[in-house]
Amino acid sequence: MNFLSYETSKNMLDLLQVNASRYERVALNASIGRVLFEDMVAEFNDPQFPTASMDGYAVKHEDLQSGTIAVLGDNPAGHDEKRVLNAGESIKTFTGSMMPEGADTLIQIENVTYEDGKITINEEVPKGFSVRPIGEGYKSGDILITKGTKIGFAEIGVMAGLNQVMVKVAVRPRVAVIATGSEILDLGENSDNPAQIRSSNNYTLAALFEQAGAEVIQLGTAPDDRDSIMKTFENALASADILVSTGGVSVGDYDFVKDIIPRLGAEVVYKGVGIKPGRHIMVAQKDNKFLLALPGFAYSSTVTGILYALPLISKMLGKTQPYKTVAAKLQEDFKKRSKFTEFTACNVVVEDGEYQINFKDKKVGSSAILTNMLNQSALMIAGEDDKFLEADTYVNIILLENF
């Protein structure tokens, strides 16, 4: 069987056209974790006027050398201060307060002594000290948050400062997930057959896709029955943007999924990619919907779900990238096990300001070992031409966080 190269499969996936124009408005406090559908632009300066950044006295800097300065009164936060400072005058001004007109410096309380309506300067400060200038945070017209950003706590705070009661966010793509195979037992099911195994693929992938911003339709498991799988797939495509299945895509007698997908009227984009794990992956498209048939082993289905499902979800959400890829230095030698592009679970550490990786406690075996992805792991990418990589070689890794 001929396999596409990983790079070719990735480029073909990037060229697929998806519907990325759907949005909805949600309340600000309901937008956490959603993807922003429009640039967030500042309509005003922050702050809009010179503002005190601590408690102290608003003064003219040139008056500090006089030694004592008269105090006109207080200027609490939120007070619309109208007084204008003249030479030799000050106003007690609190954190967040508008600086009085005529003042150019705030001297903190700790640097003065107050007595009989005057302050004595014990220690001078530079001109402009503790005064936030107009537009220090941002200026009117600045793009503060770009379209495609996943909304977190900082974005919530900034948008609250912009008085964004409702936020325009991308509609979550709907992804249906099913694990196929007569050997699969769903959660809660019991069997006396020791040859059956507990399903994890559909739950792993559902969690992965939800973390990436999708709405997941959990279809559970299906036995190796051609007609029932066909019917399940048809029903799923009626409501989902993407259908992701695991199992039934290889070359076995009971691998029905690879044959069912074309019968659904879907056009196969490609089947078979030169990657390890997961080389029997199939990607297909029916109208504006996509079908991904992934391998049945847990590690294989998870890796291929990251590589092929996340980019489609990301494009539908309008995000710029589905995951973060960075360069990292090998802390030990690495020997490839195949002629394909390999994705190997590794441990990530940051030392001397750079990412470094090792394979301590990572088990070498089949593509079923999902535990290798625990404990803040990453995926190391070793290309087709790589055979033996010495320690201190730099490689690319996919960080398994913040999808």
Image (cartoon, rainbow, N blue to C red):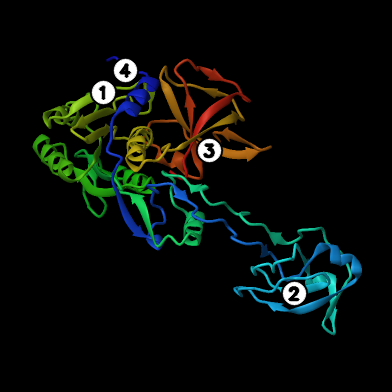
How far, Cα to Cα, is label 4 from label 1?
A: 8 Å
Give the left or right position of residue 90, taking residue 227 as reference: right
Q: Earlier in the sequence, mark 1 or mark 3?
A: 1
How far, Cα to Cα, is label 4 from label 3?
A: 31 Å
At horizontal 75% and vertical 71% (from top left) the residue drawn is: 85
Residue for badge 2: 91
Residue for badge 1: 271
Q: Is residue 298 visible?
A: no
Mark 4 belongs to which amino acid? Phe
How far, Cα to Cα, is label 1 from label 3?
A: 33 Å
- Residue 78: percent from left, percent from top: 59, 73
- Which of the two residues, 101 or 273, is positioned nearer the viewer here? 101
Q: Earlier in the sequence, mark 4 or mark 1?
A: 4
Check residue 361 in the rendering and tell me which mark sits there, or answer none: 3
- Residue 248: percent from left, percent from top: 22, 32
Q: Earlier in the sequence, mark 4 or mark 3?
A: 4
- Which of the two residues, 245 or 13, is positioned nearer the viewer here? 13
Q: Is residue 108 visible?
A: yes
Nearer to us of marks 4 and 3 is: 4
- Kind of element beneath mark 2: strand
How far, Cα to Cα, is label 2 from label 3?
A: 65 Å
Mark 2 belongs to which amino acid? Ile
Q: Are marks 4 and 2 in contact (CB under 8 Å)?
A: no
How far, Cα to Cα, is label 4 from label 2?
A: 77 Å
Check residue 3 in the rendering and tell me which mark sits there, or answer none: 4
- Kind of element beneath mark 4: loop
